[in-house]
Amino acid sequence: MSTWWRHAVIYQVYVRSFADSDGDGIGDLPGVRSRLPYLRDLGVDALWLNPFYPSPQADAGYDVSDYRDVDPRFGTLADAEALIAEAHAYGLRLIFDLVPNHTSDQHPWFRAALASPPGSRERARYLFRDGRGSRPPNNWSSAFGGRAWSQVPDGQWYLHLFAPQQPDLDWTNDEVRAEFESILRFWLDRGVDGFRIDVAHGLAKDPAMTDLGTGHATSGPAVEGHPHWDLDEVHDVYRAWRRISDGYPGDRTFVGEIWVADPARLARYLRPDELHTAFNFTFLLAPWDAKALRYAVDESMRALASVGAPATWVLSNHDVIRHVTRYGDGATGLRRARAAALLMLALPGGAYIYQGEELGLPEVLDLPSELRQDPTFLRTQGADPGRDGCRVPLPWSGTAPPFGFGPSTAWLPQPPSWARLTADRQSSDPASMLSLYRSALRHRAALAVDDSLTWLPSARDVLAFSRAPGFSCVVNAGDRPASAPDAVRGARLLLASDPLASDNTLPPDTAAWYLTETR
Ligand code: NOJ
């Protein structure tokens, strides 16, 4: 029997924006617990929760000061344990977010490093270096803007590929390795089903710390030969972790956040003794264009097949502009997002749904500057608006903010126009995005198709493929109506992202699922 993570639909819960139980305006674990019935009814298999550990929140929890507890803003350790138990009782698995590339600057280890002299055991857990005269050790820059080095009072510099409050750990250090293996066991012992690994391609750095040359950027998918992304040494870490997870019963799994340009490089992380799956950013980054999407599908599947790993598909997450907006915003963006959902959920492998995409939420583009919290916005003095626009709290019910998110004003303001988009309102509308996701997930679970994908001959702007036995998906990504390919003539229409014409022609930006006779 195939293991669950090979074809799971995993819902990303951005905890601070999901549901607030205690009225501080910030979502929390009891809030997640209260909405488990919604997630079960949606029909997903598992939840991935963004970090909820104690953290000064310099980067929304990706600056962890204690890996074995829960931040009081988000609840207690007992809440996390109760969440695991309750999710399991609903048949939902749980994936937690592990942040191994860096700690918070308030982590006891970093505080000890600052209190200890250069060359000490405490400093050796991080990447402290002497500068070049008054300049930092090299020219690396932070992914959030500005330089990747900060100087401490005794003159040494420490590396932070993200914010200064996120010092990078030295993964050649045995104490660092042992500590994270112990953290893995801490959560595995509590029944967590897997981990999403933050910046999984970043743990190893070129020991010579050579300057970043032309052709290598800090942001975006990494190209081979980069001095701090995707170094071969990182694979050792995952081999050790895999040995640990394999020692636990129940198919525990790792999904890597790995930004590399070449799908073949991505596949290296998914060799049989390393991670199980990785996010497919090639698919996420593809524009709404049949050729680009087909290329992303083909390349991903080809590269991953070479290591026997399943593909995963993702359209949005908490770091990118929501795809309704990326695909054109307004009615066009929404139509395309509906079609994209049917495309993604028809492909072989696993799929990720970012909270709110099932409601068709757009990016919030007009957040007031003084409310923005993303370090990207702050470190670029607003030149980069940052990621707050995709992190606005969910609208659950009612006609005015906070739309049932919690008892009081939410940490980021929700647009009043979201009254149309609440989960409650969409629940009773068969034409809503929520109803589309629910139907698609219900059909997907019942399809029982294998992992094959065969492209069907189709017009240029159309993606059409079949999966055995007897299932086909057709997507018209063009701006003109397209007739369905011959292969699905006479097939039974299972679901369409928008109504088809009476002769079964697909309008622009529409996808449809069919059952063919051979079933
Ligand atoms: C990737 C996370 O998804 C992002 O939100 C975070 O800012 C960086 N890693 C740094 O941890």
Image: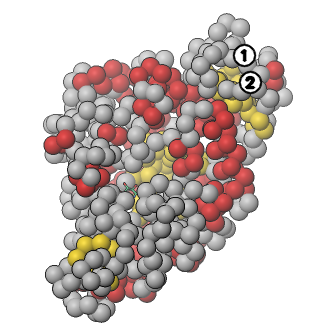
Give coordinates of residue 118: x percent, y percent: 26, 90
Amino acid type at circle 1 is Ser
Disc 1 target residue: 483
Above or below residue 46? Residue 519 is: above
Is the shortest distance between ligand 1 and the CB of mark 2 under 8 Å? no
Give coordinates of residue 232: x percent, y percent: 58, 74
Q: Indicate the quadrant containing the C terminus: top left, top right, bottom left or bottom right.
A: top right
Name the residue at 69% across, 17% down: 482
Task: Look at the image and tell me whether residue 184 can be seen.
Answer: no
Asked if the residue under mark 1 is in contact with the one under mark 2, i.e. CB atoms within 8 Å, the reply is yes
Give coordinates of residue 445: x percent, y percent: 62, 38
Amino acid type at circle 2 is Ala
Distance of label 2 from label 1 (alpha carbons): 8 Å
Give coordinates of residue 198: x percent, y percent: 43, 62
Name the residue at 54% across, 49% down: 281
Name the residue at 33% across, 26% down: 422
- Residues 218 and 109: in front is 218
**Disc 2 on helix, strand or loop?**
loop
Circle on res. 459: 2
Circle on res. 404: none
